[in-house]
Structures are given as C-alpha cells and as structure tokens.
Amino acid sequence: MTSDSDAQRPRLEPRPTHRPSVSEGEQVVFGRPDGVDGAFAPDAVRRAVDGRPQPQSAAPDPVLTEAFSRPAGSTDALQRDPYAGPLDAEPEPEPADPWRDTESLAALGEPGVKAPPRDVPQPDPEQLGVRDVLFGRRVSVRALVVLGVIALVIGLLGGAIGRITGTTIQKLTDSRVTLPVDDTKVTDQGAIAEMVSKVGPSVVTIEVRTRTTGETGSGSVINAERGFIMTNNHVIETAATNKDAKIEVVFWNGTRTPAQLVGTDPNTDVAVIKVAVNGLQQISRGDSGELLPGQQVVAIGSPLGLRRTVTSGVVSATHRPVQGPADGPNPPAAFDSVQTDASINPGNSGGPLLDLKGRVIGVNTLGLAPGGGSIGLNFAIASNVAFPIAEAIIRGDKVVHADLGVNGREVSNDTATGVRVENVKKGGAADKAGIREGDVITKVGDTEVAESADLIVAIRAVGVGKETTVTVARDGRQVPIKVTPEPLS
C-alpha cells in the first residue's frame, strides 16, 4: 500500500546510460564496414564497399604471406603435400605387412635387408695338401725318411721321461714311505709350551686357611737352597694378622707341604714365605727395565684354585704406576708395574709373569675387571721392584721407602693437571721444602705427575736422602722446589 506522502514525492528520471566515447581511429579499425549491418560479411564486402577500399590495421608480413598462403593458381582450402603427386593419381598399394594386421597369423617372410654374399674360400694353389705330400711326388723320399726318424726319436724320449716321472710320483705318494723329520729342530708344542715345561716346577700354589675361611694364591721359588718363595702380601695377609691361620704350599707335581711367613711389605704388596723342602727348582730373575711393549709374556698360577694354569699375552705398557685398593689398616700399595693383556684372575696373585726365556719380569698382582672376569687390563709388580724388596725381607732388613709427606687428590683443569696437595705432614720433606696446601704437583724431576700413583712411585724411585726437584703450579705459574725425600714412617 502506498501512502499519500509517497504519492506527493517527485519521481526521478532514470539515470542516463554511460557510453564511453569511441575515437575515430578505433571506429575505423574495430567498426563495421560501411553498408554492413550483420556481424559477418563476405570478403568482397569487407574489402570494398561502393568501390571504396576499407581501412586495414596493418599489411601482413611478406615472408609469412609467402610461407602460409596458397600456391599461385590454387583454389584448395588446405595445402597438400607437394610430393604427393597429382590428385587424380592412383595410390600405390602398400606392401603386405603382417605386423599391421593384428588378426594375421605368425609367419616367416622375406628379410628386410638381403644378406651380402659370402666369400667362398678358395684353395691356395701354393699350399701342399696331404694328398700332394704323399702321392703328388712333390716331396723327395729322403725328406720323408728324415721326418720319420725325428718322429721316432721324439716318441722314445717322451716315453722315457714319462716312465721316470711316474716312478718318482709313485714313491712320493706310497703310504709305505716315511719322510724323515729332525725332531731336534721342529717341535709341535711351540716355544711357550717348551718354556712352561721347564719353568713349571718353580711355580707353586699357596693356600691360606683358618677355621672359617680359605684363600688361594700363587708364588715362585726364588731361593732353592733355603726354600724361599715370593708372593703377594694380600695372598698371605690373613696369616700375618691371624695366628691360627695355616699356610700350605702345593708344588707342580701335587706334593703339599706347610710353609711359614718370613715377612711382608704392604706398601708394594710383596711377601716372602719359606718351606723346608730339599731339591727345589729356583726360578730365573729377569730385567723388567729391558721390556718393550708388544713383547710376548706368559702368566702361570692358580686362578680360582685351578692349579698350573697358563695364560699368554703381550706387554701392553712398561713403567705403569699403579695404586691398589685400600686393604684394612695398611695404606694402598703403590708400585711400578708391567701392564699386560695376559689373563690374570683371583688366584693368579703372587705368581710369575715370564718372558719366553722363562725369566720372571713381574709378579702378577692386580687386574681391572669392572664387569667381572679378565678384560685384558692386568698388572704385575716389576721384577726390578719386587726382587730387591724380597731380598731385603730374606736378609731381615727393614724395607724403607722414600716419602714426600703429603696427601693429595688428582685434579685436571685449565690451570694445571696433577696432584693437588690437601695435607702437608708437619716436619716432613714437603713441609721443610716449602710446599703448601693447595699447590698442584705436576712433576717430580722430569717425570710427569697425573695421579697419586705417579707421585708415590716417582718419589720412591728418587730414594731416601736424595735431592730432587718437585714442580708445583701455584698462583698460575710453575714453581720448581728442591725436595729431599725422607723415610716413610
């Protein structure tokens, strides 16, 4: 419904349609030709209306016109192949091709290309055949006789050589023939077996028993006349602290005999026991200072109670300072060692580490086995350390070791690497020389110090009362200090 107010309002006219202006040029190019009303017109109309040519946008390129226009005089809508021939020519029949007919059966046909003619070999007129030689009378009778004699000689010589060769092979393969062997030069056992057979009687098993416990170790005879046997301190330590303990030695042949403790040195884990037996075989002492890494060595002992066990390996390192675990009231043993990959297990302790000549170059004492068993990181007290201490025990002398008089721990940082001094013994060698707590000992003489075992072994190597230079890191600089080690108390 329309209200009165709406009827009174004035009506607006429609807005005029906007038609953009067309320029004269656009009209000429895009507009229809004069006289044309429709959208399309014949070509004649488009080109001329009332005899007047219509304007064109641009003339075609002459090159394109020649390339794409009809040939002169041609009225065809599409250009044909100029090589196809006239339109009214009959097409040539295509050759039969079974591959073009999918319904055709397989068949053999003519090859696509004819094979070239083969050359037939012609006999060489200059070459003599068998017939010519034998019957053609081209070779003289004398030549045939000579050839026959040569062939006969070759046959006889070949037969003789074959007979000789066959006879020789028959002799070499005859099961009744035995080739001689020099047993003095060739041994099936090998160098290690030969050495062990000679040294074995010098190695013993040591058993220490109390009423409630029992321990097993190894040892070697170092003095046959007086019956002294060298072993480790931790093998017989129970006998040293328990008067009820008994020591028994089991020899290579299984003979058992009681033994008594002579003396120990807990600081190097060396001990000596004695047996009252005649006719012992003494082991030879070797020089651990002449060892080279890679040299073959053999360990003999009773690991886990298995007597007469032999293991072999090589020298992994020489002069390796080692500090054993703390054991009771005694300080941890520290010593210069021979590192080897020859298996050493509990029970090997105290037994000899030998070179291939059967000489003792170490006393087996320690093996690192984080996961249990031998992992090839084993250590023996160097013979040049163990034998002098054992001989001092046999003489009844007190074993004295040089001492610096400090306690420390290993450190490694940007400032220094060595042993940091935690405590200085009052009145000791370090205290007298001016070494302070907090100093980091990096060298003893020319020997680098990386851990406590290095420091202990290096000071002992200097000896009591012999001056040496100890280098310490202090306040960011290296300070050399003259020190005279004193006896370990």
Image: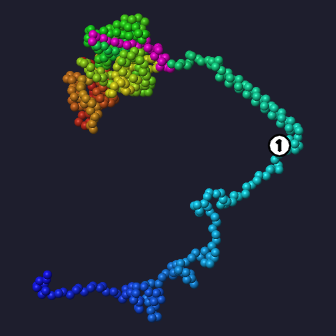
Query: Residue 125: where, in percent of width, then height?
Result: 83, 50
User: Is disc 1 surrounded by few (<14), some (14 to 19) or many (20+) residues within 10 Å?
Assistant: few
Q: Secondary structure at mark 1?
A: helix
Q: Quadrant of residue 218?
A: top left
Using residue 270 as the reference point, say whether residue 8 is left or right of it.
left
Q: Is residue 36 above or below residue 202?
A: below
Query: Residue 362: where, in percent of width, then height?
Result: 39, 20
Q: Quadrant of residue 164?
A: top right
Q: Is residue 41 above or below residue 447?
A: below
- Residue in the foreground of this view, choosing between 399 and 432: 399
Tag 1: amino acid: Val
Using residue 127 as the reference point, say whether residue 227 is left or right of it.
left
Using residue 42 as the reference point, say whether residue 146 is left or right of it.
right
Residues drawn in magenta: 190-212
Residue appearing at x 29%, y 29% in the figure: 451
Dot 1 corresponds to which residue?
130
Q: Quadrant of the C terminus?
A: top left
